[in-house]
Image (cartoon, helix red, strand yellow):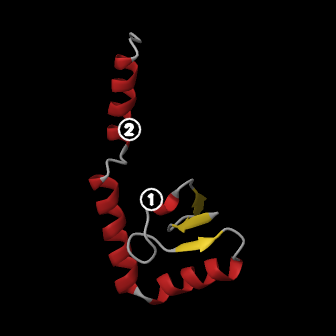
Amino acid sequence: EIYTLSLHDALPICNIREILTDRKNALLFKETDNEGLLSKIEELCRNEVLRLDIARQARATIFEEGYTWDSNARRVAELFKELGVSE
């Protein structure tokens, strides 16, 4: 299982590699690799260019792929509409 490194924590997500690319829009590490996590945190602390680039690319991925709350809400509403569920 792969985890992503954010500024706050590491979150497990199924099929994460379909969304995130290591060193492009995330830093990835294996679930049980504590040393790997530590290494990624240290690298982000030392490398401002990498930190800002990953942040920029991650934000672009969110908006390009429609992973915002608004986009998800629209998809859910459309699904309910298709299923004939009324308000």
Classify the position of the N terminus by image quarter: bottom right
SS class, disc 2: helix
User: Is 65 drawn above or below residue 35 in the view shown?
Assistant: above
SS class, disc 1: helix
Q: Nearer the viewer, residue 84 or 39?
A: 84
User: Is 33 drawn above or below residue 87 in the view shown?
Assistant: below
Q: CA distance from mark 1 to mark 2?
A: 17 Å
User: Is 18 drawn above or below residue 75 in the view shown?
Assistant: below
- For badge 1, the amino acid type reads Glu
The image quadrant that residue 10 belongs to is bottom right
Q: Residues within 10 Å of mark 2 (few under 14, many from 20)?
A: few
Q: Position of residue 32 (x, y in %)?
A: 72, 71
Q: Which residue corresponds to mark 1?
A: 18
- For badge 2, the amino acid type reads Asn
Identity of the residue drawn at 38% across and 38% down: 72
Q: Which residue corresponds to mark 2?
A: 72
The reply to whether callout 1 and callout 2 are in contact (CB within 8 Å) is: no
Q: Nearer the viewer, residue 82 or 6?
A: 82
Q: Nearer the viewer, residue 5 or 76?
A: 76
Res. 39 mark: none
First reached walking from the N terminus: tag 1 or tag 2: 1
Horizontal side, residue 52 vs residue 3: left or right: left
The image quadrant that residue 49 belongs to is bottom left
The image quadrant that residue 26 belongs to is bottom left
Q: Nearer the viewer, mark 1 or mark 2?
A: 1
